[in-house]
Amino acid sequence: METVILAVIIALVAFVAVGGGLVVGSRRKKRLPPAPPAAPTVTEPPAEPHIGDEAEVPRDEPRRTIEEVELPEALPRTPPEALELPEAPELEIPEPTEGRLVRLRSRLSRSQNTLGKGLLSLLSREHLDEETWEEIEDILLTADVGVTPTQELVERLRQRVKVLGTRTPADLRQLLREELIALIGTDSDRTLHTESHEERPAVVLVVGVNGTGKTTTTGKLARVLVADGRSVVLGAADTFRAAAADQLQTWGERVGARTVRGPEGGDPASVAFDAVKEGISEGADVVLIDTAGRLHTKTGLMDELGKVKRVIEKHGPVDEVLLVLDATTGQNGLVQARVFAEVVDITGIVLTKLDGTAKGGIVVAVQRELGVPVKLVGLGEGADDLAPFEPGAFVDALIGD
């Protein structure tokens, strides 16, 4: 019986072993899914060298100790007192203003030919008929004397020529000289009010439209004052034109005048205020304020000019307000003059570009328009070509000898 049971157990074990092998075999025979395609071979970049790696095979070279290394020789040290400092620019000595207009009379040659000599030629005719007097009127109008002053002058010339009778060239010249001087006027105060006060300098405000030569005139005026023995401080209140402050500073440096300036596009009134303040602290005689060249059609800008004047007056009254006019603009300059006179109280006129122009009569017209005298005239591009206006010398330059 035991033998039979043992045989059965052995048979079961054998059967299980055979069945397990069949299962394993069947699993092994099952087909697996195809492997994905191999990725392309990528060549990796060479590894970057790290600290400590040798860039190349070291070469056999003799090595020196620190004691064997030769140091370069030290350069000799120059003592500070031996250093060459840049030389300060040599100050220029402006020409004296007395008699300057007489020295510059040749600059009025074209005005002389047109106005003075033209009038003398017509007045020298044997018979002065209506056509001749009309020609005289045309010459005066072409020279920008103005309609009303022209009519007054012609009427007075008619009367005096009739009384004079015989007319020699010398008589005619004297006659014309007297009448032109009377037309320009000799009663006006043409002096520049630049006398310093007890606690502050005199203040001169220079105004005018673009292109009249205002900044240049301010610089030349500084030379006029220095030539007369005054110390000057310049205020570059034209902050809207990039080169204006540089230009004014260059003019000042040539005669030793300090320039106060502000940032480009800054507040002009602030610069003007600081310039007067600097003039007070330095004890200067005169402060010249160059303002922006404002178009007379820009109401806001003109109002700002009034603000500049009001801010300056916190230090004290402005002594002079000079309006710079271009003589070549003729009657158009009178429109500018009227607008400026409404904003600030003009005390004097500077006529520039009067050299080589046939517009000498603008002196009469602008004075009549504003009731303000011409105080300075510009007769050229030279540094000392700005001259105090003298009616007698001006008329002599117009009509010649």
Image (cartoon, helix red, strand yellow):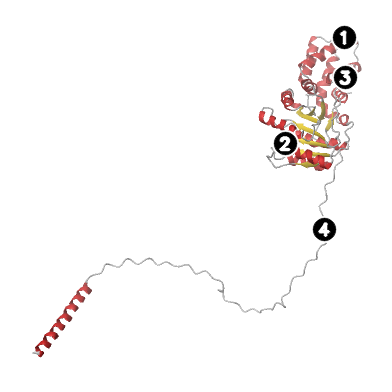
For the residues labelled 3 and 4, the Cα–Cα distance comes to 64 Å
Mark 4 or mark 1: whose residue is earlier in sequence? 4
For the residues labelled 2 and 1, the Cα–Cα distance comes to 58 Å
Which element carries disc 3, helix, strand or loop?
Answer: helix
Percent of width and height locating residue 200? 83, 37
Mark 1 or mark 3: whose residue is earlier in sequence? 1
Q: Nearer the viewer, mark 2 or mark 1?
A: 2
Asked which quadrant contains residue 172, the reply is top right
In the image, taking residue 19 as reference, residue 82 lies left or right, namely right
Which element carries disc 2, helix, strand or loop?
Answer: helix
Residue identifier under label 2 = 269
Cβ–Cβ under 8 Å for marks 4 and 1: no
State the residue in front, 247 or 115.
Answer: 247
Q: What amino acid is at disc 3?
A: Arg
Residue identifier under label 3 = 177
Mark 2 or mark 1: whose residue is earlier in sequence? 1
In the image, taking residue 70 as reference, residue 155 lies left or right, namely right
Residue identifier under label 1 = 162
Q: Identify the residue shown where x is 88% and y is 29%.
A: 102
Q: Identify the residue shown where x is 13% and y is 85%.
A: 9
Question: Is residue 210 in view from this perspective?
Answer: no
Mark 3 or mark 2: whose residue is earlier in sequence? 3
How crowded pointer 3 is (Cα within 10 Å; few <14, some 14-19, many 20+) is rated as: some
Q: What amino acid is at disc 4?
A: Leu
Percent of width and height locating residue 197? 85, 35
Q: What amino acid is at disc 2?
A: Ala
